[in-house]
Image (cartoon, rainbow, N blue to C red):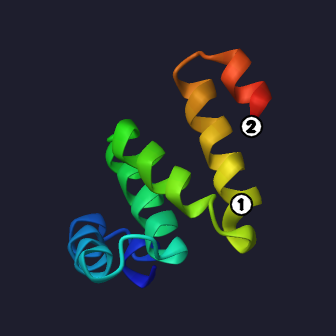
Amino acid sequence: MLNYRKADSEKGLDLVAKSLSINAYDAEANFVYGLINKRLGNLLDARDGFSVASLTPSYRTVAHIELAKLALLEGNLGEAEYY
């Protein structure tokens, strides 16, 4: 998360990928993975990260908000309303 905040997306993506290789269902790592990929323009990868993060109750709301934002970016109003 620190690398994301410092706008060092490439290093942040490397570190979060390492974390996800150990535990693919870590909600925080998946959420950060989604944020970094969204910043880099990899919307499909961002959607994957937010979707897995939304499985954990503590990240569900923020992950759904980010998924709604992605749907709006893609022009899918029905999906945005769903989230």
**Numbered badge on residue 72:** none
Of callouts 2 and 1, the N-terminal one: 1
- Is residue 3 left or right of 76 when viewed as pictured? left
**Numbered badge on residue 83:** 2
Locate residue 53: give its quadrant: bottom right
SS state under label 2: loop
Q: Residues within 10 Å of mark 2 (few under 14, many from 20)?
A: some
Image point (76%, 58%), residue name: 61
Image point (22%, 79%), residue name: 18
| Residue that badge 1 annotates | 60
Image point (79%, 26%), residue name: 81
The C terminus sits in image quarter = top right
Above or below, 54 against 4 in this view is above
Hey, what amino acid is under mark 1? Arg
Locate residue 68: give its quadrant: top right
Image point (62%, 61%), residue name: 55
- Is residue 74 left or right of 10 when viewed as pictured? right
